[in-house]
Image (spheres, rainbow, N blue to C red):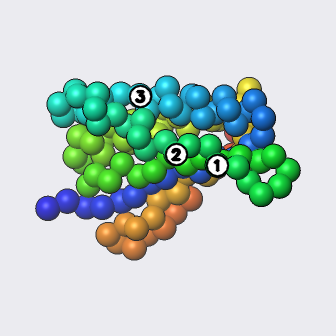
Amino acid sequence: MGYLRRHTIVVSGWGDYIEAAHTEAMRVFDVGDPVTGATSSSFQQLVSPLIDGMTNGERSFFVAPDGSKEWWDTSDKGDELRAKFVEWLRSPEVHVVWVEVQFGDDDRQTLIVGHSDEETD
């Protein structure tokens, strides 16, 4: 038996900035299955296509939850990849807005884990 805790990242922006963020997400999540190493179950499938907003040219995408229970290999790899992508999102050269949320937790906890409005040192 395992413990469910879902995490997702939502990213929005314009022009080359959102394109660069989407490209980086695809690169970061382009890994194989943590158990078998098979590339057919790449984490890259968790990265949505870019979605056009209705006005102003804003586009968005999200990184879906990995679907694994906490402390399983797939969950651990998903945690690692999300952390790597968030580290990239936090760099000063990145000009998109984003939020990472935890939801659908077995303990009914919904949290904002990180976001682009945070103060950075």
Residue 65 screen position, x and y as percent: 41, 52
Q: CA distance from mark 2 to mark 1?
A: 8 Å
* Front of the two marks 3 and 1: 1
Determine which of the numbered discs, if any, sits on residue 48 in the image.
2
Determine which of the numbered discs, if any, sits on residue 101 in the image.
none
> Residue at label 1?
51
Quadrant of residue 90 within the rendered picture: top right
Do we see residue 29 in this rendering?
yes
Q: Earlier in the sequence, mark 3 or mark 1?
A: 3
Q: CA distance from mark 3 to mark 1?
A: 20 Å
* Front of the two marks 3 and 2: 2
The amino acid type found where label 1 is placed reads: Ile
Residue 67 vs 95, above or below: the answer is below
> Residue at label 3?
30
Do we see residue 87 in this rendering?
no
At 48% from the left and 67% from the top, the residue drawn is 110
Q: Is residue 120 left or right of residue 57?
A: left
Looking at the picture, tell me which residue is in the foreground, 21 or 101: 21
Q: Secondary structure beneath disc 3?
A: loop
The amino acid type found where label 3 is placed reads: Asp
Quadrant of residue 79 within the rendered picture: top left
Looking at the picture, tell me which residue is in the foreground, 30 or 68: 30
Residue 48 vs 81, above or below: the answer is below
Looking at the picture, tell me which residue is in the foreground, 75 or 50: 50
Residue 86 vs 23, above or below: the answer is below
The amino acid type found where label 2 is placed reads: Ser
Q: Residue furthest right?
A: 56
Looking at the rendering, in which quadrant would you find the C terminus? Answer: top right
